[in-house]
Image (spheres, helix red, strand yellow):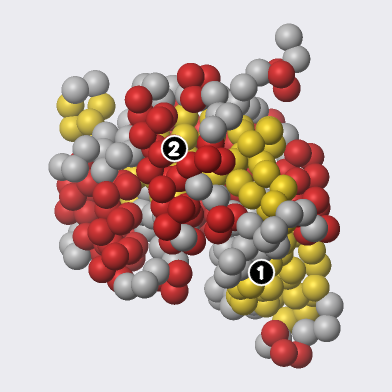
Amino acid sequence: MNTRTLPPEVLAFGEAMALFVAETPGAMAEVECFRRGIAGADTNVAIGLARLGFRVGWLSRVGSDGFGSYIRRTLEAEGLDCRYLTMDADHTTGLVFKERAEGGADPRVAYFRRGSAASHMSPEDAAQVDFTAARHLHATGIPPALSASCRELTLHMLDRVHAQGGSISFDPNLRPSLWPSEAEMRETLNALAAKADWVLPGLAEGRLLTGLESPRDIAAFYLERGAQAVFLKLGPEGAYYRGVLDGHEAEATVPGFPVERVVDTVGAGDGFAVGVISALLDGRSPQAAARRGNLIGAEAVQVQGDMEGLPSRTRLTELERDLPDLP
């Protein structure tokens, strides 16, 4: 059977934007030439999982404009199932411009997304989704920050997948500038994380959302609220895992992989999510999942672009082949 006719086994949703990356270093005001691509934390993870062979369905809206057509074509070329992607004739596609940073610094970005097609998503956009076929849903804190209707869609997606017995991963992906207040951001995202099985915050994000300092305490915060496992991103130091495995609580700090030259840090956290989610869906242990997250995150920062460093299944097999056995 042609797998293209099968409903997606993994669902992802959010905003895909047309990305313009400066061809040369320097301030945005001085750059004359940009290279086109696509951007979006949710799309990065969706693309990463598709490259590893999962049937990934993408739910979103883009404008009925040239940028929207480009995004759809690019996502389909990456293997995403775009049957749930709506072309919106009334609103435009979001745009983002990114400077070319040097020396591994975080590049500065400028967003043009207010009132975009994706910000008008609502539960109605999921009316045709076959939730019975969904094995997993990946969600982030970005869609609920875009609008009230996107927040309703996020709750709807989580509740429907949970009701069908699918697993859910949640990456807070904090965007404070999109929220009316920090308090509302914390309350909303912590409530969404409580609906997830696997929570994947960065350490700074976890501290801001919980008011706690240590990885162990941050993980406990989400475990007490219903999560099965928490994977905390620690940057170059690696990752911390804590959760329940075979009825017993386990925890481990998994070291990161050394990188000789950091080119672009954008997308590193999304690469980590791809590694963790794919490993758990492959039936690997949480410790192995954290290590794969570190591995793909390290790959992501070595190339220019948000998702260009995400590996194929063949490349991932090569990277993991020589790794030592875990204890």
Residue type of the residue flagged with mark 1? Val
Residue 265 numbered tag: none
Compare residues 165 and 41 and report the one nearer the observer.
165
Task: Please determine whether, in this image, residue 247 is positioned above or below residue 47.
Answer: above
Task: Please determine whether, in this image, residue 215 is positioned above or below residue 103.
Answer: above
Residue 252, quarter of picture: top left
- Residue visible at 37% across and 22% down in the picture: 165
Check disc 2 and report its element: helix, strand or loop: helix
- Residue 297, given in percent of the width and then of the height, sits at 53, 51
Q: Which residue does the numbered mark 2 point to in the structure image?
A: 157
Outermost residue, bottom side: 30
Q: Quadrant of the C terminus?
A: top left
Compare residues 243 and 86 and report the one nearer the observer.
86
- Residue visible at 68% across and 33% down in the picture: 83
Crowding at dot 2, Cα within 10 Å, few <14 / some 14-19 / many 20+, comes out as: many
- Residue visible at 44% across and 22% down in the picture: 283
- Residue 190, given in percent of the width and then of the height, sits at 27, 53
Q: Quadrant of the N terminus?
A: top right
Q: Can residue 64 be seen?
A: yes
- Residue 194, given in percent of the width and then of the height, sits at 26, 43
Residue 164, quarter of picture: top left
Task: Please determine whether, in this image, residue 119 is positioned above or below residue 179.
Answer: above
